[in-house]
Amino acid sequence: MIVAALAVLAIPLKAQNDYNESVVVKGSYTPVIEQAEKLNFPAMVTDTLSRIEHVFHYSITPTRLRAMYEPTRIRAARIIGEPATKLYNNYLRLGFGNYWSPLADLNWCSTRDRLKTYGVRLNHFSSWDKLAKMPEYGNAQYGNTDITLFGKYIVGDVLQLSSDISYEHDHNLYYGFTDSTLQAALGLTRDNISLSDYRASYNVATWNIGVKNMELDVNKLGYSADVHLSDLWTVWGANELNLTLSGDIHYGFPIMRDYKGVAYLHVDWEHYRNVSPGDGIDNFLGILYSRPEYIDHTNILRVNPYVDFLFRGLNIHAGLLYAWDGYSAAGTDKQNLVYPDVTVSKKLMKDNLVLSLAATGGAEANTLNRLRMVNPYIDPDFSPGVVASHYDFVGHARWTLSKKLEANAEVSYSLRSADLTFALGPRYSLNNVYSDVYNNLNRLTVGGDITFVNDEMITLRAGGHYYHYTITDLGAVTPAWSEYYRPDWDALLAIDLNYHYKWFLHLESQLLGRMDSDQGTLPMRYGIDAQVEYRHNRALSFFLRMDNLAFQRYWYWANYPSQRGLFLVGLTYTIPHK
């Protein structure tokens, strides 16, 4: 597993006012409040240059059941003379950092309305400077901008209609070469090239529309349906069109006298159409290659029936997943795959100890959109739509030691085919473009974390993982490629402080074990990140974000050195609205 780099600007929210409510229930009923498990935060090392896929792992015990008993509704009491509260329906964050790094976030939505909600989100972050004290690497610009319009409307109190439309633009430079490499390989100097010669950009337009039945009563049918349409196009002429149709139905039913089950059926179909450009592509710094234009189609159909029920203290999720892999590339066979979808949880020691076992699996397409999110320096001649399959077997334990202390431990074993990794493309003499590589492997993961919380004023987290990979089928891949860019361990230590709801501090230290690459072994990475926020009032706050405070010059991808540190200052502001 590759631990991705991520810097998070978390804006803590002020707690709501406390309130008490009493309900008198007559009948044979034992009220139970399920305790949601805390999040298990994996190690994260912030990369100040490249966009790397962010991978989170949540250790949450499944709690999909609703109580069978439904008490009689109580009429709401009318409060006379209640003052109108200020509503904050907008949010603006502005910042600027070294390396000429502007930040802008704008969120606006409609005010309180029982039937409709609509709004807009706009986000931008970029960097426009060179690598500090490494002028031989030239410019290392990158940027991300996206805008989203969204809305939903409730019809007849039982049917919710929702839709959103968005546009995203990303760009980065293939800066992983030096002046001496450029001169030796192509006989050029940096004066002979422009930024556009090694610039990559991606544009994504997306439209989603959905409908959901909001009927939650027992013995009544619920359903939802969604349509996703997206189009991605690149500066070198590649195009990826995606259409996804999904939906589910569910129905609650009694089991004997005291138990209840809920049956689900989830179905989705994904279609990808990839168009790759033909001959004469100007592929970064004037390197030409010749190939015919081609079109690939990938289809994945998933059918997932399952049942959730609580029986004698066991929380059981039982089902299976059928997947049909319809990848159309020459030389590949369409596949019918069946995966388990089973999770069993048991609470012990007065609910202080929760033990869980799970057997799951799935199939996903390694699309162009996923490839560029994992590695922004990919080869335009990628392999579109390769379908990855995995079977996962997990054992998890959560132990609540006290009201302030909780520990999690987990061991998992995964059987993975067409697992994605990367290696420098052999056709590029500058050694700065990565080809996608797919391995069949097994992965053993052992990890855990411990969390201490003291009255919302201080939170301490510490955890880590150990990974062991076994290659099962290399195919055309040489053994030296087998474990590229896969750390053998990671660790995290983090602290959050809340001082009188005025000052907020987040301090985080990460360690990432060494990784093998086609350019040798990349050393262990370590990082220290921090964020300080001062909340002046409910509408105005100021923040300082500091990444890579260890000033480490690390290489997440070979030949791509990072910046030594990022300092970003800014403010957030909201306009109250009655």
Image (cartoon, rainbow, N blue to C red):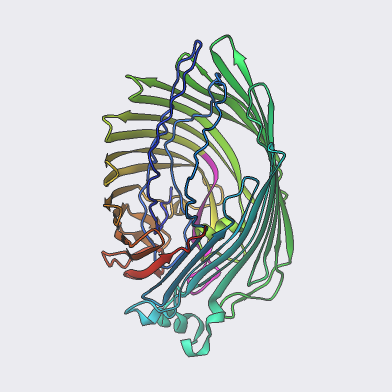
Horizontal and vertical percent position of residue 58:
43, 40
Q: Is residue 552 left or right of residue 180?
A: left
For residue 304, say whether it is visible: yes
Horizontal and vertical percent position of residue 273:
72, 56
Horizontal and vertical percent position of residue 124:
51, 68
Residue 334's place in the image compared with 100, above or below, is above
Q: Say which residue appears at 59% left-offset and 77% top-offset.
A: 287
The answer to which image quadrant residue 147 occupies is bottom right
Residue 90's place in the image compared with 215, above or below, is below
* Observer-nearest of 142 and 382: 142
* Observer-nearest of 394 and 485: 394
Residue 457's place in the image compared with 109, above or below, is above
Q: Is residue 446 left or right of residue 417?
A: left
Mark count: 0
For residue 383, say whether it is visible: no
Q: Say which residue appears at 39% left-offset and 68% top-offset.
A: 571
Q: Hey, which residue is sitting farthest bottom in the picture?
A: 191
Q: Hey, which residue is sitting farthest front in the picture?
A: 81
* Residue stretch rendered in magenta on the structure: 416-434
Residue 394's place in the image compared with 454, above or below, is above
Horizontal and vertical percent position of residue 38:
38, 38
Q: Is residue 123 left or right of residue 565?
A: right
Please tell me whether residue 421 belongs to the stretch shown in magenta. Answer: yes
